[in-house]
Image (cartoon, rainbow, N blue to C red):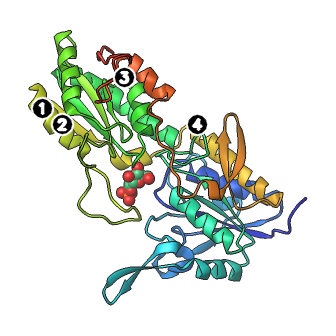
Amino acid sequence: METRIQRIAIVTGGGDAPGLNAVIRAVVLASSRHGWECWGIRDGFNGLLAPDTCLGEPVLRLSLEAVHGIGHLGGTILGSTNRGNPLRYPVAGAGGMAEQDRSAELVGLCRQRGFDALVMVGGDSSMEIAACLQRQGLPVVGVPKTIDNDLDRTFQTFGFDTAAGFATECIDRLHTTADSQHRVMVVEVMGRYAGWIALHAGMAGGAHAILLPEIPFDLEVVADAIGRRDAAGRRHAIVVAAEGAQPLGGERARLAAPGGGHAERLGGIGAWVEAQLAGRTGKECRSVVLGHLLRGGSPSAFDRVTAARFGAAAVRALARGESGVMVALGGQEIGTVPLGEVAGRSKRVPVDGDMVRTARELGICFGDRVLPDAPQSVMTPA
Ligand code: F6P
């Protein structure tokens, strides 16, 4: 049964990911079939909570023309921010910066604008916000986005495939230079506290060692494995380090300036591993940080299609009167899961799962001391 929706809004929050524009386009096209008006909120919720900070109209009508030809473009035509969480909105106070809950005000602003429902595209923080707005009476459907692929209850988020694909291409290129110069190349990739990008790109790119946040590593183990590889006449090695990887008994590498919506900014593990491995192996080592390059560029075919399916599914959910849910990929089909089951949870690489097991069987080293009955890391891949 159709609900009496007339006008919906869409917002893209947190770090951008390839496929956001494909979601926006899908939401606009699909909602137009119901005769709904679709509006976009600029720069996360800043279009409503801090309109003066936005360039252009802070809340804009998304006509069919406005989304024409954007499905293959990276970024988001609406802009995004990870500084405008309405539950913990940064405000300047007498004693410095403080945080304020502006969620009730936000729901009021949505009502003033006549928004009957909201499609919220984002990562784990966005799903927490979506759950809160829903509890306050605003119907919300979440769409899972992040290159990190760390959202729970969906097989995959859009953005991840593009990021992992690009990281793979970079690793492919590093093989030839590392091989020519008999070097160890350390590749640092994003992913926060989950190692999905490192694991997928590392396996696809034929890395010899992969350092994951989920498996504390010992560089002596990695150095030994590189030594065995050297002894076998394989003079180069590729080590992929997830930005959140952590040495056994040590700390994650963090960047000095916090900033942004994340409690901590991760980064620097690649350079540290480079220096440590140079000392332990005596080999020439170099490191490269892929960083925000992983968030840029056009979405892959998979991400475009998944984003389009997510956007259309969000509209379908609202049309049948469903809200308080996130659209999710489960196997081949798109379904919905309650926001309460997603918010505040994260999906990390299962250390005893098939991917890690397969990687070990291929000889990839994770920097841990594998159990005697587990396949030994011999680092034999070419
Ligand atoms: O969550 C996406 C992500 O790109 C993480 O992989 C990374 O740690 C973080 O965002 C970087 O955030 P920022 O763009 O604020 O530096």
For label 2, the residue is 274
CB of mark 2 near ligand 1 (< 8 Å): no
Q: Which residue type carries mark 1?
A: Ala
Which of disc 2 and disc 3 is earlier in sequence?
A: 3
Q: Which secondary structure, mark 1? A: helix
Q: Which secondary structure, mark 4? A: helix
For label 1, the residue is 278
Inter-mark Cα distance, 3 to 2:
19 Å
Q: Residue at x 22, y 15 (%)?
A: 229
Q: Which residue type carries mark 3?
A: Gly
User: Image height check: is 299 above or below 208?
Assistant: below
Which of disc 3 and disc 1 is earlier in sequence?
A: 3
The single residue placed furthest to the top in the displayed view is 232
The single residue placed furthest to the right in the displayed view is 1
Q: Are marks 4 and 3 in contact (CB under 8 Å)?
A: no
Q: Residue at x 86, y 65 (%)?
A: 3
Could you tell me residue 152's position as x and y percent?
57, 47
Inter-mark Cα distance, 1 to 2:
6 Å
Inter-mark Cα distance, 4 to 3:
23 Å
For label 4, the residue is 301
Q: Which numbered circle lies on residue 204?
A: none
Q: Nearer the viewer, residue 16 or 37?
A: 16
Res 302 quadrant in image: top right
Which of disc 2 and disc 4 is earlier in sequence?
A: 2
Q: Nearer the viewer, residue 364 or 169?
A: 364
Q: Are marks 1 and 2 in contact (CB under 8 Å)?
A: yes
Could you tell me residue 213's position as x and y percent?
36, 42
Q: Which secondary structure, mark 3? A: loop
Apparent side of residue 81 relative to residue 60 in the rendered image (left or right): left
